[in-house]
Image (cartoon, helix red, strand yellow):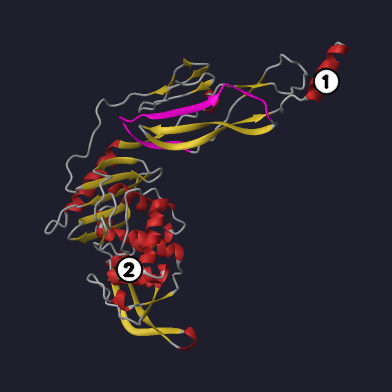
Amino acid sequence: MRSKGWISLIVPLRKAGGILFCGIFLLTQLFPCVVSAKENQINPGSLYALSAAVMDGENGRLLYGKEADVHRANASTTKILTCILCLENGNLQDYVAVSEYAAGMPDVQLNICEGEYYKMEDLLYSLMLESHNDSAVALAEHIGGSVEGFSNLMNEKAAELGCNDSYFLTPNGLDKKKGKNFHGTTAYDLGKIMKYCAWDSPQSDKFLQITQTGEHSFTNYEKKEKNSFVKGSKTFSCRNHNAFLQQNRNCISGKTGFTSQAGYCYVAAVESEGRKYTLALLGCGWPNNKTYKWKDCEKLCSYIDGNYHYRQVPDITSKLASVWIKDDENNNFDLNHKTYVRPRVKQKITKILLADWEKLDFKVNYPTSISATKKGTQTIGKFQMLVGNHIISTQPIKIDCPFGRRGLDWYFGTIARMWAGT
């Protein structure tokens, strides 16, 4: 049961504009906004992928999911996390030493050799354009000190991003098991990681530059005296294998992957007519069905572009009921005086991507009266914006209290005014 003196506001938002109507809930008038919506939800139809997720690039909301929370092997899509960790924790001009372990990685390889050096930036192109497994391990050892150390960094970053069903053991995505756990993630978690890489990381611009590059050429380096380096004799050329970049003009980044356990996998970032969203596919066919992932991607893009549109978020601040500040030392020295203050909330989101059948809800909780404590700004409640059960935003509700609590001086002043007849 909700306690008296608190208000809660739910505001559904639908397609046709924003018709406000009044309702009374407990002590406060509320102004829901209602617009027409389709009766039935549309889905994109059947997909080849065992798991799929489409996520809003602005707020991380799952727009569509098919077994989106099932933990599966994810192959070389892992390398988007490897790349962003290297960008955030290393220097592009670092010289990366190649160990025997790194040089011994299975295909796909750059064919680097133990004792060679490469610039970190060049290995990142190798990692993302050609998906070289040996480059991934060399980078991991350089940043994390060892593959195990880098694995810890991967799992820490994944947890930081809210990836609750991911477990990373290798920087290249090769299948590996430790105890009962195996290297992998979920389609939803993979979408979260891509969202971070493409838009949220301080290194997003460089990440996009690397993953959008068509070709990149470089050389190895040889170490000389006093830790100086000169270009070596080996030359390499990498070509981007993310075919969706050419197939769909709205794709801004992506990474393919395949292992015998994972099947074909893919993750992408898309920007389409102002929309920002990620696509993630796991177990999207096995040989000889390499093109299934592109068909699923096109189907999901068509689904989002055809059904999801931006809606303006109504400003609810002016609809919030004023708060009675009890026992405040008002300037009138009046025991019966009542001070009311309008609460305020900063709505950071002004528009949101919604399907025609979805509702945007507001939940507002704060007391309609509080006892005065001190003069100044105080937080008295919270404002939440939701679509279904997904919380899009949570903001504090604040008031600017003009007076502090009544003290002895204030009461003496009141008595003095009464005696004086003023």
Task: Look at 32% across and 64% down and name the residue there.
Answer: 171
The residue tagged with tag 2: helix, strand or loop? helix
Stretch in magenta:
349-373
Residue at the disc numbered 2:
136
What secondary structure prevails in the magenta region? strand
User: Marks 2/1: CA distance?
Assistant: 76 Å
Left or right, residue 388 beside residue 261: right
Residue 207 covered by magenta stretch: no
- Picture layout, residue 253 above or below residue 415: below
**Which SS class for mark 1?**
helix
Q: Going from the N terminus, do you reach mark 2 or mark 1 first? A: 2
Outermost top residue = 421
Residue closest to the eye, 148 or 352: 148
Q: Nearer the viewer, residue 305 or 130?
A: 130
Picture coordinates of residue 201, whole percent (x, y) = 44, 55
**Residue situated furthest right in the rendering:** 420
Q: The disc labelled 1 sits on which kind of residue?
A: Phe
Q: Amino acid at mark 2?
A: Ala
Q: Is residue 361 magenta?
A: yes
Q: Could you say where residue 111 lies in the image, as x and y percent from the top left?
A: 27, 77
Residue occupying image coordinates x 32% and y 71%: 135
Check disc 1 and report the residue beneath it. 412
Q: Is residue 368 above or below residue 182?
A: above
- Is 182 in front, or is 232? 182
Of residues 155 and 57, the one drawn nearer to the viewer in this rendering: 155
